[in-house]
DNA sequence: GCGGGATCTAAATAAGTGTTTAGAACACAT
DNA sequence: ATGTGTTCTAAACACTTATTTAGATCCCGC
């Protein structure tokens, strides 16, 4: 019967949101357009009507996710200043991962599926990040390795979340646990920045 | 026509290997039993005949993977001794991830799918690891966080592999690159072990 | 040589996939 | 009031999925 084109503007956004949720849960291949439609309150045909296919919707979802990541990391990259750069970067990345669980899973699925969404994201950030590192830490490979270690340490908490749930008595996602972890990675970043090479 | 029950003993192992490869590539849900059968050189019906279904085969694959991980980590855990413990653990974990790409992807898929295979693995290692940490580094949470950071730093190199390919001129999986990374994480482990708290 | 049992395949089943098609229901302009 | 165009659904399409069934093919003991 259709409610009439009135809420037409909202439907596309709802599909996008539902798609992000579904793809974050199951990845592109295992994600179902019928499930997306159901969550958005429309038929599966609509994702075709608005986006032109499952893959196209997925690309839109990934593009939007990349934009969000960019908006979150950009400030930490823009504001330079050698002392505390690593800590600021680690803090921003941590906040990003802590806040948006969906995006986190989405990117992990992208990595596993070997999609070029990750490669695109990488090639966009490699140049400025490399320049930053070179400018502040010198040209050696050790700076790169340290950066990888730091980012890995930040992501590790969320990557090993199910394992950590057994470790800590508290839930790893609780506000208190997150605050403690954030404090740790920031301190770690400071220590690594001053680490003798 | 069947080659006759002669290589019957080999078929089950071949299915298991093909299943491990397929599930590592695409995960449980997206993995296809037909593809597994094709890779093993038999019909899809055989995975049912030998294992009782797709899920059961997957469980067998995960169980075998867990066993391999256990065999790899156990020596580093067994040989105690405070100085160098962290470095030994980091080295063992690095070698494990560097060697078996398939297992790495399999476990990542397990984490994303929220399977209880990871939880089972975790609950098996939480107790001994926690005891080790408590024994050598004290009872504070900081030791736990440091361990998480270290393991994250080790895994990060492989997790961000597609990104790193753009960073380094060299392929991250090359023998030279791996050796350099291993040296870095071991040095990092030593530094973290001596880090003031 | 002849059952018996194990091993394997091809076909059938039922459910689910993404996408296409035909058409209904509504808003709006003329 | 009669088109016109947008928005949406229900049904159909072609395809893949995991699993089941029936039967063929072989080896081994008798």
Image (spheres, coloured by chain):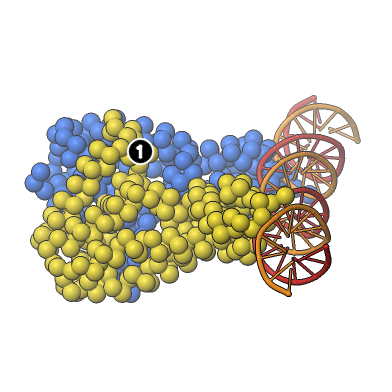
Chain colours: A yellow, B blue, C orange, D red
On the image, the x and y values in percent for residue D3 come to: 80, 70
For this view, does A148 lie left or right of residue A31? left
Q: Circle 1 marks a residue in which chain?
A: A
- Front-most of residues A15 and A8: A8
For this view, does B29 lie left or right of residue B94? right
User: In which quadrant of the rendered image does the C terminus of chain B lie?
Assistant: top left
Q: Are there few (<14), some (14-19), or many (20+) residues within 10 Å of tag 1? A: many
On the image, the x and y values in percent for residue B18 come to: 57, 50
The residue that appears at 46% across and 64% down in the rendered structure is: A63
Q: Quadrant of residue A87?
A: bottom left
The residue that appears at 29% across and 56% down in the rendered structure is: A93
Determine the secondary structure under disc 1: helix
- Front-most of residues A129 and B155: A129
On the image, the x and y values in percent for residue B62 come to: 49, 41
Q: Is residue B70 visible?
A: no
A19 is higher (above) or lower (below) than A123: above
Task: Count the marks.
Answer: 1
The residue that appears at 32% across and 60% down in the rendered structure is: A72
- Front-most of residues A143 and C25: C25
For this view, does A93 lie left or right of residue D12? left
The residue that appears at 16% across and 35% down in the rendered structure is: B140
Q: From the image, tell me which residue sits under label 1.
A: A163
On the image, the x and y values in percent for residue A73 come to: 30, 62
B47 is higher (above) or lower (below) than A12: above
Q: Is residue A176 visible?
A: yes
- Front-most of residues A104 and B153: A104
Q: Quadrant of residue A74?
A: bottom left
């Amino acid at each position: 019967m259709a409610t009439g084109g009135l809420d037409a503007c909202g439907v596309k956004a709802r599909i996008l949101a539902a798609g992000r949720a579904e793809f974050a849960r199951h990845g592109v291949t295992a994600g179902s357009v019928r499930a997306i439609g159901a969550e958005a309150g429309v038929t599966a045909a609509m994702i075709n009507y608005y986006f032109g296919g499952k893959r196209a919707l997925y690309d839109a979802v990934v593009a939007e996710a990349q934009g969000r990541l960019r908006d979150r990391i950009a400030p930490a990259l823009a504001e330079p200043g050698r002392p505390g750069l690593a800590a600021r970067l680690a803090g921003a990345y941590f906040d990003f991962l802590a806040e948006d669980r969906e995006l986190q899973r989405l990117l992990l699925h992208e990595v596993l599926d070997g999609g070029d969404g990750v490669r695109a994201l990488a090639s966009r950030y490699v140049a400025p990040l490399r320049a930053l590192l070179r400018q502040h830490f010198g040209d050696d490979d050790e700076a790169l390795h340290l950066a990888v270690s730091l980012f890995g340490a930040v992501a590790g908490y969320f990557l090993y979340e199910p394992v950590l749930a057994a470790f800590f008595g508290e839930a790893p996602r609780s506000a208190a646990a997150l605050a403690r972890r954030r404090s740790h990675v920031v301190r770690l970043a400071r220590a690594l920045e001053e680490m003798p090479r």
